[in-house]
Amino acid sequence: MAYKIVLDAGHGGEDPGAVYKERKEKDDNLKLALAVGKLLEENGVDVVYTRTTDVYQTPFEKARFANEAGADYFISFHRNSGEEPGKYNGVEVLVYDKKGIKYQMAENIVGALGELGFKELGVKERPGLVVLRRTKMPALLIETGFINSEKDNQLFDEKFHEVARSIADAILGTLDEETVETPLYYRVQTGAFRKRENADRMLYQLTDQGFPAFILKENDLYKVQTGAYLQLGNAVNMEQRLRDEGYSTVIVTK
């Protein structure tokens, strides 16, 4: 199946997004969106861009554009910013809710970027964002590190092509799940509970400690898992970190 994906470079024109020193978020967003789009196009995806130059569109215009294009997915590129330079770092992906294929794609993107050295902040629900609420197709917003973090900027710049490739591969891998072959992602499970409140308790504890944890409901069980890694070695490293904190763990592929 041929997919059509709208790639949105956040901000633009008179809206620079977050600014740090001479660096403007809108420029990083456009550079990455174009690089990821090129890789997707090379793999047969029909890519449509909300912008390819330095112009401004409202979030409502972006959502309407994607809907009118009849896209299968909408992916928006952004960079985060903290109130104090250097206080925060890491990548996260925002979704309307943690359901369906968009959630799986978001998890895969976070895990792929984590393998490059970014701190994994996980997948978060942001139902109030226009581009996630008004789009009719699965939609994601990628926060590719903090623009006022020297560590994240160094990763973004020095590993730029790897960042673009990792995002593209995570997208393509998720699309393959709907068609031919399911890519294998390793996760570390710390518990499986029949009561949601017990799973929530462990989830809160893990996230408070900085682990990219989430809950997966499967049959009658609420499974608490951490990470989504293409390389088994990265899952083993995460498992060791969790065991050092006193958790009982098992590596799973679902």
Image: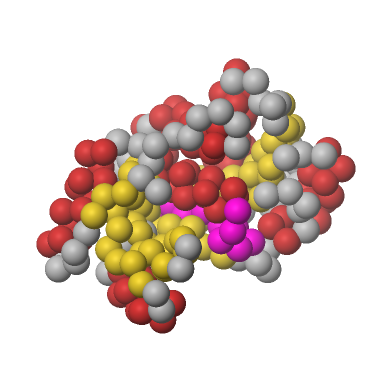
- In screen coordinates, is 31 left or right of 186? right
- In screen coordinates, is 8 left or right of 79? right
State which region is magenta.
Answer: 86-100
| Quadrant the N terminus occupies | top right
**Spot occupied by residue 149 in the image (x, y as percentages of width and height):** 38, 53
Image vertical order of residue 219 relative to residue 32, above or below: below
The total number of labels drawn is: 0
Q: How is the image coloured?
A: secondary structure
Image vertical order of residue 110 relative to residue 191, above or below: above
Judging depth in this view, the residue of 145 and 150 nearest the camera is 145
- In screen coordinates, is 173 left or right of 77? left
Q: Is residue 22 visible?
A: no
Residue under the image location 69 percent in, 42 percent down: 73
Magenta stretch contains residue 189: no
The residue lying furthest to the top in this view is 42
Residue 114 sits in which quadrant?
top left
Residue under the image location 68 percent in, 63 percent down: 129
Magenta region, main secondary structure: loop
Residue under the image location 42 percent in, 68 percent down: 222
The residue lying furthest to the right in this view is 68
**Spot occupied by residue 165 in the image (x, y as percentages of width and height):** 47, 29
Judging depth in this view, the residue of 127 and 162 nearest the camera is 127
**Spot occupied by residue 31 in the image (x, y as percentages of width and height):** 57, 33
The residue lying furthest to the bottom in this view is 197
Judging depth in this view, the residue of 250 and 29 nearest the camera is 250
Q: Is residue 69 visible?
A: yes
**Spot occupied by residue 198 in the image (x, y as percentages of width and height):** 36, 79
Judging depth in this view, the residue of 40 and 81 nearest the camera is 40
Magenta stretch contains residue 87: yes
Residue under the image location 46 percent in, 68 percent down: 220
